[in-house]
C-alpha cells in the first residue's frame, strides 16, 4: 500500500491489511483504522457534499463530533445512512458510499445550489413556501424539499439483531481517557464496583493521540499498563465501543454498545446492545472537543481541527498533507505543529491570532497577530490568504479555536452550564444528582491538574458511599496552559464563513436572523437550523452563540445557552426497539386449547395479549363468514364449544367479600345465594360503565369474579386500589386466577347431554338441580376438580366448565370426543360475537368509556342501598335525560342491505349534521339465524322508539339507507332457551 | 380488536418509558417500570356517602364527589402520589416526589399509612 501517506508508529496494526471500498473504489487500510483515517491515508479528502449548498466537504474531526464526513454503509444487503466516517471502525470488505449528491461525488449536479446561495439563506423555506398554492405540489415538495436532507433511508427492514440489557455499579465512569482510567483504578482499589464506558474502540482517549509523559512512561505505554491492571480487577468492567448517551433520574443512564459493527460477519450475534445502567454515583470524564474558527471558505476539504491532525498523525500514522499550516488562537495549535513536524510532516506556517505569544518553532514561518480571511481550492484547499494579504500555498490546514468541555450529560437534567472566562468555554453548572465531573470535561486542560482533580473527586465519591479510602496514588505528569485569546469569527472575511458546516449555516445567516428579530438562542437555532441534525452542534453551537453575543454587544453568558438533551450521539431506531419487533413487539399468551386449535386449522386473532381462535374453517369453506355462519347455526341447533380462558378471573375471599363486591359493582352482590352466579356491571367513579362480567358465590366468604379479556389487568388493579386505599378495614383478599383455570363455554341445546357424559356421576346437573345461573364445584373425568357455571353469553342453554389449566388441553379433546354424537362444533371469537349481538349483550364496542348504565338500559340495576363506585355520580341529572341515548337493535329495511358499524342515525327528512345527529351504530353482524344483518347501537330515547324507521348514514362509505329500530334481543327475547 | 389495543398500551411502557427508581419499603430499590402510576394521593380521601332509596344525592353531596374526582392540585415541587407495584407485591404506595426534579423523598405503604391515621 502506498507508504507515502503513512508515517511511522501509530496504534494501528500494519501487519494486518484491510480491504474496503469507497464509492466502489477499492482501498486498503490497517486494523485499528477508522474509515476516516483510512480515507486520508488513501489521500481522499473530499468525502461528502454539504446539506444545502452541496459544497465539497472533507473530514473535519477525528471523533463523534464530526459534522461533514457522513457516509452510508452497506452491510448484509442493507444500507444505513448518516454514519460518521470518523467513528466507523474499518473491517474487511467494508462498503461505504458518500451521500447527498446527484451524479458523482466529484461532479455533483446539485452544486449549482452553491451559486444560488444568495437566495438560499436563513429562513428560505419559511419565505419561499408561501405562495402560489399550487407550487406546493409541483415545485416545493417534489423538487426543493427532495433536494435537501441528509442521506436516504434503506426502505427495507433492518436485518440486524439488537438487544437490551441492564447493568449495576457503584460508580459509572463515562470516558476512558486519563481522568477516567485514573478514577477507575482509584475507585476499584478502594473496593467500589466500577463500570467504565468509552465510545471509542480504543481506550485511552486523547492519550492515544497526544504524546504525554505520565509516571515516567509515554502516554501510550501508560494506557496499556493501566488497562492491563484494570482488566485483572474483578470489580471493574471496561466497556469500549459503548456510548453513554443519556443521564436520567436517580442515577440511571442509557448506554449503547456496538457489539459487532466492526466485524464482517456477526454470526447472528446482536449488532448493538442498549444498556440501562443503574449507578450509585457517576463521574463524567468525557473530555473536551476542539472547536473551529469561522473565516472565509473555512469548509474546504483539507481543513481539519488541529487536534484531529495530531490524532491522524499520532494514533493512525497518517500524513494528512504535504504542506500543512495551522491557524490558532491558543497554544494547542503550536503543539499540533510541533507534533506534526516531529512525525516528519512538512509544516509550512503557524498563523496565530495572538500578537504577544512567546510560542516559536524553529524553521516554521509564524504569522503572529494574523488571521486567515479566505482560502482557495475546490476539491481540496490550495492556499490560505491572511488579513495582511499574504498568500500561503498549503494542502492542509489545522484550526484550533479552543476546546469545549463535553458537558452534554450534565445538561440532561436541565443543568445550565456556566461560562468560564479563563478558558473561554462552558463548564458544567448544576449536575444530575450523584454526578461529578472531572478532567477536561470540567474545563481543565493540563494533564497534571486533571490527574490531581480526578483523584480528589474519586476519593470524595468513595467516602460518600462509605468506602474507606486508601492513601491516594501520586501520579506525575506533564502540564500545559492553553493561554487562549478568544477568536470566533474573522471579521475581515468577505467570503462566506461557515459556523455550522453540517447545516450550512454561515455567519451571514446569524447576522440576518438577528436583523429579522430572531434574537433568542432558541429562535436562532430554529430559524437557521444551527446546531441541528446528527452532530447537534458539537462544534458549532458556541461559535454561533459567540457571534450572536458580538452582534448584541453582550457577554456570551448573557446571550443564553442552549442545553443538550439525550442522545449524545444518534441511536438507530432498531437499537431502541431491541427484540421488540414484529411478533415480538410484545409477549403473547396462548390459551390452553391453542395446540388443539392449531391442529384443527383455527385462524387466530390477537385479543389483548392473547391469541384466540377466531374461526375454524372446514374443507370447502373459502370465505370466513361461511365458517362463522356454520359455527353459529350448529351451536344454536346442537352444541358448540369455545375457549373462554382469556376472560379475567379473580378469586375474592374474606368475611367482607360480599360487602366489598356490593361496593365494587353497581348492583348488589351481598345477597347473592351460595351456588349462584350473577351478572355484574362495574362503573367508574364518574358514573360511566367500566366493565362487566359474572361473579359466582361458592361459599359464604368465597366469590369468583370474571372480567372482560381486555380489562382483566385493569379491573384487578382497581380492586386492589379499593381494597388497600379506600376500604382498607375490610377483611377481603384477592388473587388473580386467570392463568390457573382453563375455561370452556359449552353452549347449545345439547350442551347438558354432552357434559353429563364427562361430569362425574355424583353431580346432578339437571335443570332442577342445577338451574340457570347456578355454580358448583364438581369433578369431571373421574375426579379432576372443576368449576361449573350455568351462564350463557350465546343465549342458548349453556355452561362454562373450568378445570386447572394443566388439564385444559385434555379437556378440549375429551369434550370434542364426547360431543361427536351431537356433531359438536368448536367456535371462535367471530361466532361468539355474532351470537352476543343476536342476543343483545353489550361488549367492548358498547362499553366504550362514554356510556352510562342508563345508556345501556341498565339504569335500574344501580344500587340505592349502599355507596358503590359510581352510583352517586350516575345520579347526575344529565345521566337521567329522558331523551338520552339508549342501546337498541337495528334491522335494515331492505333485508339484503349490509349494515356498517360507525354509521350515524338521523330522523327521516333531516339534514345530516352534528345538530341533527341522534346516535350511532356500535356493532353489526350477519345473523345466520335471521338471515340478514343486525346491528346494535345507541340512539336518542331508543327504548321508546321501537318500530320507528330512521336513516343510517355513513358518509365515509357514502351509504345512506333506512333502518328499523328494534329490541336489542333479536333472538329468544324471553330467554326460554337459556332456562331450558 | 378495540380492546386489544387498550392492552397494548400497558405493555409498551416496559423497558424505557420510566427512568426512575422507587425505594419500596419492603422490597428495596426497584425500577419504576414495575410500577403503575395512578395520581394525586388525595384520591385516598374519597367522600363518605350513604344513598337514599327515595331521593337523589343532594347537590352538595354531588359537588363533594365532583371535587374529589376532578379537582387536583398541580404543585411545582413536592407532590404526594399513588403508585401501584403491579409487577411486584401488588402494594399501593404513597410516594412523595418533587415534580421539578423527580427526587423521591418518601415511599410509604398505603395500608401502613391508613393504619397510623386511625390509631
Image (cartoon, coloured by chain):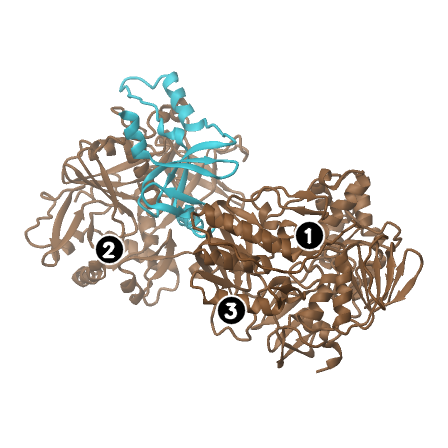
Give the mark nearest the N terminus, 2 or 3: 3
Query: Is A451 on the left-hand or right-hand side of B25?
Result: right
Query: Badge 3 is on which residue?
Result: A228
Spatial distance from mark 1 to mark 3, Cα to Cα?
Answer: 30 Å
Subunit of label 1: A
Q: Which dot marks residue A640?
A: 2
Chain drawn in brown: A
Chain drawn in cyan: B
Spatial distance from mark 2 to mark 3, Cα to Cα?
Answer: 71 Å
Evaluate whether label 1 is on the same chain as label 3.
Answer: yes
Q: Can residue A494 be seen in this view?
A: yes
Spatial distance from mark 2 to mark 1, Cα to Cα?
Answer: 74 Å
Residue at 75% in and 57% down: A501
Foreground residue among A641 and A303: A303
Q: What element carries label 3?
A: helix
Q: Which dot marks residue A404?
A: 1
Amino acid at each position: 500500500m502506498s507508504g507515502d501517506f503513512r508515517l511511522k508508529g501509530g496504534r494501528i496494526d500494519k501487519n494486518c491489511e484491510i480491504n474496503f471500498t469507497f464509492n466502489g473504489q477499492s482501498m486498503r487500510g490497517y486494523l485499528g483504522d477508522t474509515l476516516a483515517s483510512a480515507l486520508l491515508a488513501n489521500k481522499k479528502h473530499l468525502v461528502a457534499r454539504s446539506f444545502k449548498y452541496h459544497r465539497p466537504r472533507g473530514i473535519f474531526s477525528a471523533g463523534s463530533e464530526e459534522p461533514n464526513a457522513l457516509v452510508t454503509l452497506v452491510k448484509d444487503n442493507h444500507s444505513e445512512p448518516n454514519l460518521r466516517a470518523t467513528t466507523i471502525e474499518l473491517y474487511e470488505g467494508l462498503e461505504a458510499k458518500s451521500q447527498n449528491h446527484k451524479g458523482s461525488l466529484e461532479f455533483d449536479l446539485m452544486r449549482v445550489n452553491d451559486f444560488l446561495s444568495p437566495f438560499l439563506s436563513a429562513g428560505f423555506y419559511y419565505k419561499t413556501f408561501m405562495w402560489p398554492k399550487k407550487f406546493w405540489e409541483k415545485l416545493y415538495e417534489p423538487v426543493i424539499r427532495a433536494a435537501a436532507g441528509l442521506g436516504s433511508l434503506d426502505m427495507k427492514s433492518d436485518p440486524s439483531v439488537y438487544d437490551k440489557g441492564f447493568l449495576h455499579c457503584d460508580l459509572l465512569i463515562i470516558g476512558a481517557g486519563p481522568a477516567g482510567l485514573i478514577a477507575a483504578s482509584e475507585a476499584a482499589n478502594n473496593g467500589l464496583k466500577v463500570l467504565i464506558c468509552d465510545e471509542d474502540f480504543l481506550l485511552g482517549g486523547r492519550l492515544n493521540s497526544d504524546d504525554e509523559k505520565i509516571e515516567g512512561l509515554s502516554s501510550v505505554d501508560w494506557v496499556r499498563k493501566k488497562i492491563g491492571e484494570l482488566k485483572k480487577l474483578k470489580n471493574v468492567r471496561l466497556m469500549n465501543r459503548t456510548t453513554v448517551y443519556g443521564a436520567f433520574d436517580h442515577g440511571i443512564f442509557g448506554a449503547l454498545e456496538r457489539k459487532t459493527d466492526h466485524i464482517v460477519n456477526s454470526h447472528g450475534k446482536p449488532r448493538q446492545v442498549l444498556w440501562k445502567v443503574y449507578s450509585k454515583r457517576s463521574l463524567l470524564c468525557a473530555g473536551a472537543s476542539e472547536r473551529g474558527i469561522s473565516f472565509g471558505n473555512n469548509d474546504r476539504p483539507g481543513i481539519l481541527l488541529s487536534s484531529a491532525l495530531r490524532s491522524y498523525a499520532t494514533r493512525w500514522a497518517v500524513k494528512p498533507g504535504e504542506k500543512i499550516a495551522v491557524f490558532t488562537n491558543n497554544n494547542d495549535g503550536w503543539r499540533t505543529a510541533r507534533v506534526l513536524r516531529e512525525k516528519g510532516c512538512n509544516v509550512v506556517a503557524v498563523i496565530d491570532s495572538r500578537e504577544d505569544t512567546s510560542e516559536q518553532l524553529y524553521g516554521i514561518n509564524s504569522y503572529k497577530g494574523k488571521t486567515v480571511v479566505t482560502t482557495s481550492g475546490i476539491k481540496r484547499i490550495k492556499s490560505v490568504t491572511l488579513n495582511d494579504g499574504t498568500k500561503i500555498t498549503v494542502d492542509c490546514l489545522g484550526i484550533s479555536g479552543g476546546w469545549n468541555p463535553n458537558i452534554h450529560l450534565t445538561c440532561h437534567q436541565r443543568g445550565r452550564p456556566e461560562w468560564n472566562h479563563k478558558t473561554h468555554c462552558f463548564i458544567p453548572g448544576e449536575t444530575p444528582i450523584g454526578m461529578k465531573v472531572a478532567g477536561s470535561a470540567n474545563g481543565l486542560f493540563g494533564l497534571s491538574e486533571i490527574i490531581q482533580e480526578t483523584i480528589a473527586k474519586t476519593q470524595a465519591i468513595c467516602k460518600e458511599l462509605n468506602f474507606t479510602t486508601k492513601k491516594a496514588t501520586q501520579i506525575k505528569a506533564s502540564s500545559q496552559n492553553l493561554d487562549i485569546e478568544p477568536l470566533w469569527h474573522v471579521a475581515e472575511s468577505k467570503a462566506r464563513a461557515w459556523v455550522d458546516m453540517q447545516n450550512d449555516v454561515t455567519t451571514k445567516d446569524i447576522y440576518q436572523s438577528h436583523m429579522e428579530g430572531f434574537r433568542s438562542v432558541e429562535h436562532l437555532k430554529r430559524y437557521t437550523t444551527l446546531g441541528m441534525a446528527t452532530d447537534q452542534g458539537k462544534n458549532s453551537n458556541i461559535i454561533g452563540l459567540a457571534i450572536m453575543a458580538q452582534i448584541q454587544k453582550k457577554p456570551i453568558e448573557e446571550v443564553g445557552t442552549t442545553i443538550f438533551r439525550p442522545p449524545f450521539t444518534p441511536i438507530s431506531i432498531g437499537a431502541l426497539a431491541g427484540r421488540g419487533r414484529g411478533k415480538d413487539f410484545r409477549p403473547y399468551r396462548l390459551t390452553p386449547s391453542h395446540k388443539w386449535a392449531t391442529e384443527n386449522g383455527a385462524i387466530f386473532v390477537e385479543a389483548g395479549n392473547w391469541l384466540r381462535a377466531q374461526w375454524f374453517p372446514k374443507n370447502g369453506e373459502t370465505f370466513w363468514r361461511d365458517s362463522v355462519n356454520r359455527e353459529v347455526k350448529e351451536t344454536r341447533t346442537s352444541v358448540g364449544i369455545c375457549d373462554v380462558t382469556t376472560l379475567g378471573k379473580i378469586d375474592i375471599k374474606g368475611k367482607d367479600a360480599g360487602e366489598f363486591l356490593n361496593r365494587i359493582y353497581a348492583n348488589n352482590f351481598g345477597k347473592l345465594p351460595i351456588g349462584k352466579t350473577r351478572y355484574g356491571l362495574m362503573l367508574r367513579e364518574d358514573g360511566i360503565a367500566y366493565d362487566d362480567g359474572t361473579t359466582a358465590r361458592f361459599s359464604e366468604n368465597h366469590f369468583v369474579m370474571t372480567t372482560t379479556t381486555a380489562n382483566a389487568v385493569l379491573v384487578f388493579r382497581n380492586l386492589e386500589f379499593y381494597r388497600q386505599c379506600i376500604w382498607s378495614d375490610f377483611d377481603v383478599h384477592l388473587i388473580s386466577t386467570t392463568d390457573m383455570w382453563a375455561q370452556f363455554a359449552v353452549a347449545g341445546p345439547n350442551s347438558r347431554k354432552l357434559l353429563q357424559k364427562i361430569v362425574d356421576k355424583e353431580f346432578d346437573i339437571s335443570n332442577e338441580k342445577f338451574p340457570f345461573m347456578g355454580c358448583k364445584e364438581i369433578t369431571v373425568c373421574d375426579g379432576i376438580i372443576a368449576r361449573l357455571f350455568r351462564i350463557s353469553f350465546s343465549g342458548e342453554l349453556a355452561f362454562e366448565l373450568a378445570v386447572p389449566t394443566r388439564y385444559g388441553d385434555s379437556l378440549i379433546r375429551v369434550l370434542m370426543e364426547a360431543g361427536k354424537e351431537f356433531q359438536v362444533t368448536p367456535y371462535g371469537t367471530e361466532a361468539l360475537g355474532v351470537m352476543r349481538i343476536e342476543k343483545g349483550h353489550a361488549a367492548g364496542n358498547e362499553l366504550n368509556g362514554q356510556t352510562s348504565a342508563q345508556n345501556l338500559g341498565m339504569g335500574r340495576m344501580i344500587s340505592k342501598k349502599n355507596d358503590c363506585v359510581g352510583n352517586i355520580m350516575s345520579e347526575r341529572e344529565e345521566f337521567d335525560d329522558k331523551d338520552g341515548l339508549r342501546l337498541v337493535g337495528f334491522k335494515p329495511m331492505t333485508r339484503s342491505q349490509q349494515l356498517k358499524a360507525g354509521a350515524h342515525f338521523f330522523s327521516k327528512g333531516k339534514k345530516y349534521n352534528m345538530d341533527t345527529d341522534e346516535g350511532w351504530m356500535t356493532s353489526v353482524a350477519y345473523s345466520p339465524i335471521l338471515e340478514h344483518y343486525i346491528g346494535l347501537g345507541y340512539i336518542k330515547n331508543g327504548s321508546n322508539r321501537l318500530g320507528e324507521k330512521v336513516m343510517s348514514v355513513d358518509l365515509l362509505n357514502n351509504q345512506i339507507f333506512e333502518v328499523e329500530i328494534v329490541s336489542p334481543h333479536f333472538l329468544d327475547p324471553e330467554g326460554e332457551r337459556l332456562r331450558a | 380488536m378495540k380492546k386489544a389495543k387498550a392492552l397494548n398500551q400497558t405493555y409498551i411502557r416496559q423497558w424505557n418509558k420510566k427512568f426512575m427508581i422507587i425505594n419500596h419499603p419492603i422490597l428495596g430499590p426497584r425500577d419504576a417500570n414495575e410500577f403503575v402510576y395512578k395520581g394525586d394521593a388525595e384520591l385516598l380521601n374519597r367522600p363518605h356517602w350513604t344513598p337514599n332509596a327515595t331521593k337523589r344525592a343532594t347537590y352538595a353531596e354531588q359537588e363533594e364527589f365532583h371535587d374529589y374526582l376532578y379537582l387536583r392540585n398541580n404543585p411545582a415541587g413536592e407532590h404526594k402520589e399513588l403508585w401501584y407495584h403491579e409487577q411486584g407485591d401488588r402494594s399501593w404506595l404513597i410516594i412523595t416526589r418533587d415534580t421539578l426534579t423527580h427526587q423521591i423523598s418518601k415511599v410509604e405503604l398505603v395500608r401502613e399509612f391508613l393504619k397510623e391515621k386511625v390509631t
